[in-house]
Image (tube, coloured by chain):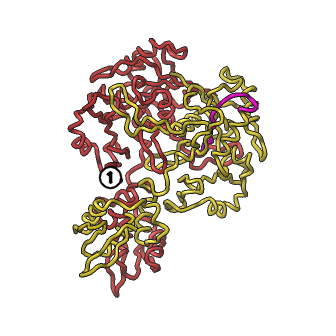
Chain colours: A yellow, B red
Amino acid sequence: MTLTVLAPDGVPEVRRGDDLADLLLAALAGSRDPLAGSLADGDIVLVTSKVVAKAEGRVRPATTREAELAGETVRVVARRGATAIVRNRLGLTMAAAGIDASNVEAGSVVLLPEAPDRSAAVMRAALRERAGVNVAVVVTDTAGRAWREGQTDIAIGAAGLAVLEDHRGAVDGYGNALAVTLPAVADELASTGELVQGKLGGRPFAVVRGRADLVLAPGDDGPGAVALIRAEGGDFFGFGAREAVVRALAGLPGDRAPFGAPAHPEELLDAIRVVTGRSGRVADGVLTVEWDDRLVPLAFAHGWVAEPGADGTAVLRPA
Amino acid sequence: MTLTVLAPDGVPEVRRGDDLADLLLAALAGSRDPLAGSLADGDIVLVTSKVVAKAEGRVRPATTREAELAGETVRVVARRGATAIVRNRLGLTMAAAGIDASNVEAGSVVLLPEAPDRSAAVMRAALRERAGVNVAVVVTDTAGRAWREGQTDIAIGAAGLAVLEDHRGAVDGYGNALAVTLPAVADELASTGELVQGKLGGRPFAVVRGRADLVLAPGDDGPGAVALIRAEGGDFFGFGAREAVVRALAGLPGDRAPFGAPAHPEELLDAIRVVTGRSGRVADGVLTVEWDDRLVPLAFAHGWVAEPGADGTAVLRPA
C-alpha cells in the first residue's frame, strides 16, 4: 500500500479575505513536482490553522495577547512558571490556548480559526465547486503532548473525513477482536503533513493521496475534528498533578467537572484506604467511614461530597 | 516537497529468531508496487513493535498477563475501572504498559521489545550490511493520548534518526525566532506509517522516502526514541487528576518524584492563597504561614515539606 504526500511551494503570503481553495489550486498548477498538477477524488487536503486564521482575519496586535488569551481560555489545566496549558473554547488543551506568534509579522499574534470544522467544510465545498473533486479537508495545528518531548501536528478541523478509523468489532488475522483500537487518522494525517510542510513557512498546504477510503461522500462532512476532543471530565488528565491537588483542597464547585463523573464507591473506598488506612461501608449508595479531614478533598476529587455524620463519622454521597 | 510511503504486502508471519532486515528486503523485492524494489540511502524504515517483539521471542501466554504487567510497570499513573495507565520500564506512559493481545495467536500476549532503540540499531546495521544503504529505522507502537480520543502510532525505538527536529534558534520568514518549536518527527513518522500499515496485520513494515535530511551518517545512531520520553517529574501530568490527590493526601515519599522538582516559593504561596486564603512570607528559602492541615498535601504536591513551627505557624521547606 502506498501513500504520497505533496506540499507545494510558491504559496504567497495569505491575507484577510484570501480564498484558500484558489491559493491551493494555483500552487498545485504551478508546482514543478511530478505529483502536482491537480487534485483527484479521494485526496485529503491539509491546511495549517495559521493560514486559515489569517484568511479569516484572526490576526491581532501582540499587545492584546493577554486579553485574547483570556478570551480563548475556558480554564487553566496546568501552569508552571511562564507556561500555562489551558483548555480553550474549542475544547483543545494547548499551551497559550493555541495563540501563536510565529509565521506572522513581528508584533502580531494569530488566534485559532473561529470554527475550524466550519473552515474545513467551506474549503471542501469550494474545491468541489471549482475543481469538481470530492476531497476531505483537514485544518492542522501544532500541539505539545503529556509525557513526551516535542510537538506533533494534530487535526483541529475536518470536513469529509472519517477522523477516527473504527476497528471496534473488526477481527485481526488471528481472530482476535480489536476491542478498543480506534486510530485517530485525522491526527496521523496532520502529523504526516507536518513532515512536508515544515515550520518555516511557505508550505501551508499538503495533499495526501492513497487513503481515499477515509474520504466521505459529497455532501457528508462527517463528525469533524470535534469528535477527537475528549469531553470535559472524560479522561484522567483534566488537571496537571499539582493543579489537581490545589483544586481538590480548595474545593471550588466549578472545579468539579474536570475530575469526571462520580467514582464507583469501591474506587473511593480504595482511595480512602490508601490515604487514611480506614475502611468504610456502603449502604444505599451512601458511604460511611470514620471522620478524617482529608476525606473532604478526597471525595471532591472523586465526584463525591463528604459531610459529618453521627458519632464522629463521615457520610459521603455522589455530588 | 514530496514524501512517499510504501508498506509492502506479503510479509510472512514473524516468529522467534526471524531476521527482520531479510524479511523487509524480501517483501520490497517481491512487491508489485512501482515504488518498491529496493531501499535507497536516506530512506526511513518503520517497523511495528509487534513484529520486533515476536522476532525477539517476547510472546507470553495470556495466563501470565498480570505477572508480566507487574514486571513491565514502574508505577501506576492513573486507574479507573479496568483501565490502568502506567509508566513502564522504558519510561513510556501507556495503557497496560504496552502489553498487547492483538495480531498474535489467541491465548498469547506480546510484550514490548526489551530495548527498542537497540532493536532499531541492530536492524539498521543489518540493512546497511546486506543492502549497502544508509537508512534510519524506527520501531513504532500504538498509544492513547491525554485529552484526545483514539490512538496514534509513536516511536518507541529509533536508530540513525534525528528524532526531534530542533528549530530552536531558527527564524521564520518574518524574522521571528521559533523559540520552543521542536517537532517530534519520529512520532510523526510513526503516525505516517500507521496510515499505510494499518491495524489488521500483514504490513509490519513501511518505508518513508523524502526526508533524507533526518537520517544521520553511517555509524551515528543518534539519541534514539528515548530522547522523546520526558523525564519522570519533568512534565505536569505525572499522575491522573484523581491519583494526584490520593498520592498527595497519602504523602508516601515514593510518590514525590512524579510531582517534579520543588516549586518556586511564589508558586507555592499562590497555591496556599487559593486553598486557605492565607498569605505567608519567605525568608532564607523557608516559607512561613499560619498552620492549616491542608498545607501538608499542598506542600507535598509542590515538592516541599510542611512542619509545625512556633506559635501555630507552619514552616515549609523544599523536600
User: Who's the residue at 63% across and 45% down the image?
Assistant: A117
Callout 1: few (<14), some (14-19), or many (20+) C-alpha neighbours within 10 Å? Answer: few
Q: Quadrant of the C terminus of chain A?
A: bottom left
User: Who's the residue at 53% across and 57% down the image?
Assistant: A85
* Residue furthest to the bottom: B311
Q: Is residue A136 magenta?
A: yes
User: Residue A130 location, x and y as percent?
Assistant: 76, 31
The answer, for residue A101, to whether it is visible in the render is no
User: Residue B43 location, x and y as percent?
Assistant: 51, 24
Left or right: B122 with respect to A58? left
User: Residue B190 location, x and y as percent?
Assistant: 47, 33
User: Residue A91 location, x and y as percent?
Assistant: 55, 54
User: Who's the residue at 34% across and 57% down the image?
Assistant: B257
Q: Nearer the viewer, residue B95 or A50?
A: B95
Q: Mark 1 falls within which chain? A: B
Left or right: B257 with respect to A229? left
The amino acid at mark 1 is: Gly
In this figure, which residue is indicated by the disc labeled 1?
Answer: B81
Q: Nearer the viewer, residue A285 or A173?
A: A285
Highlighted magenta segment, given as a residue range: A128-142
The answer, for residue A103, to whether it is visible in the render is yes
Considering the numbered disc 1 on the image, is that residue within a helix, a strand or a loop?
A: loop
Quadrant of residue A234 in the image? bottom left
Q: Nearer the viewer, residue A87 or A103?
A: A87
